């Protein structure tokens, strides 16, 4: 009877370990595989690569990843005004409003843009002027977005540059 009990326990334990490992693999694997997948996803985003790939090797290494996490933590602390460790809807709205104000300020510091869109010449872009600027941008995007994906990719950007260069030369 003892031999049967031992064999039975070994079989139960083996099944339990197999099921546990299988469930872990189904949920996305180990911490390391999740991290690798996250790094690969980040490496496909040019804006992140430009900002955090400090050594220019085209990959996010451990030190760059640590810097990215620190920056994320810093930003989270900056905008988590109620200190609950999460960014809620009010905090997101406040961040978006701040970003819009930053963009407008940056646009207002561009003399070419202001000469073109500051219609009332008050040195600030009002809602009407910003709406006109957005409409112009939308028209330009439609003009050069040849594949219709709503974005200007590198080939379309080159075509736009060539078009502008040709327009300048014809003047």
Image (cartoon, helix red, strand yellow):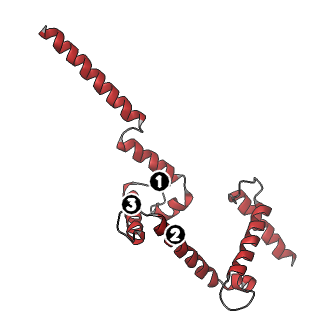
State which quarter of the image contains the N terminus.
Answer: top left
Q: Residue furthest left?
A: 2
Front residue of this view, candidates 95 and 35: 95
Q: Nearer the viewer, residue 94 or 110?
A: 94
Ranked by sequence position, the earlier of labels 3 and 1 is: 1
Frontmost of labels 1 and 2 is 2
Q: Nearer the viewer, residue 57 or 9?
A: 9
Does 26 sit above or below residue 155? above
Residue drawn 74% across and 66% down? 138
- Which residue is situated farthest in the right direction here? 170
Q: Which mark is residue 69?
A: 3
Which sits earlier in the primary sequence, circle 1 or circle 2? 1
Residue at 61% x, 79% y: name it: 104
Instruction: Report the side of 24 relative to 50 (left or right).
Output: left
Question: For the residue labelled by badge 3, is the local secondary structure a helix, a strand or a loop?
Answer: helix
**The residue tagged with tag 1: helix, strand or loop?**
loop
Q: Quadrant of residue 137?
A: bottom right
Q: In the drawing, what numbered circle is on residue 59?
A: 1
Q: Position of residue 43 (x, y in %)?
A: 51, 53
Q: Earlier in the sequence, mark 2 or mark 3?
A: 3
Numbered tag placed on residue 122 in the rendering:
none
């Amino acid at each position: 009877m003892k031999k049967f009990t031992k064999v039975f326990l070994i079989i139960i334990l083996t099944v339990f370990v197999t099921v546990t490992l299988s469930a872990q693999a189904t949920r996305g694997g180990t911490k390391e595989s999740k991290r690798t997948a996250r790094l690969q996803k980040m490496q496909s985003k040019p804006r992140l690569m430009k900002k955090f790939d400090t050594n220019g090797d085209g990959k996010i290494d451990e030190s760059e990843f640590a810097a990215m996490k620190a920056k994320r933590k810093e930003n989270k602390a900056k905008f988590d005004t109620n200190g609950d460790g999460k960014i809620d809807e009010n905090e997101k709205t406040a961040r978006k409003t701040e970003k819009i104000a930053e963009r407008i300020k940056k646009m207002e510091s561009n003399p070419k843009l202001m000469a073109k869109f500051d219609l009332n010449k008050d040195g600030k872009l009002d809602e009407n002027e910003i709406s006109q600027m957005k409409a112009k941008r939308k028209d330009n995007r439609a003009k050069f977005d040849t594949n219709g994906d709503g974005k200007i990719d590198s080939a379309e950007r080159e075509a736009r540059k060539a078009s502008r260069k040709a327009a300048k030369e014809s003047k």
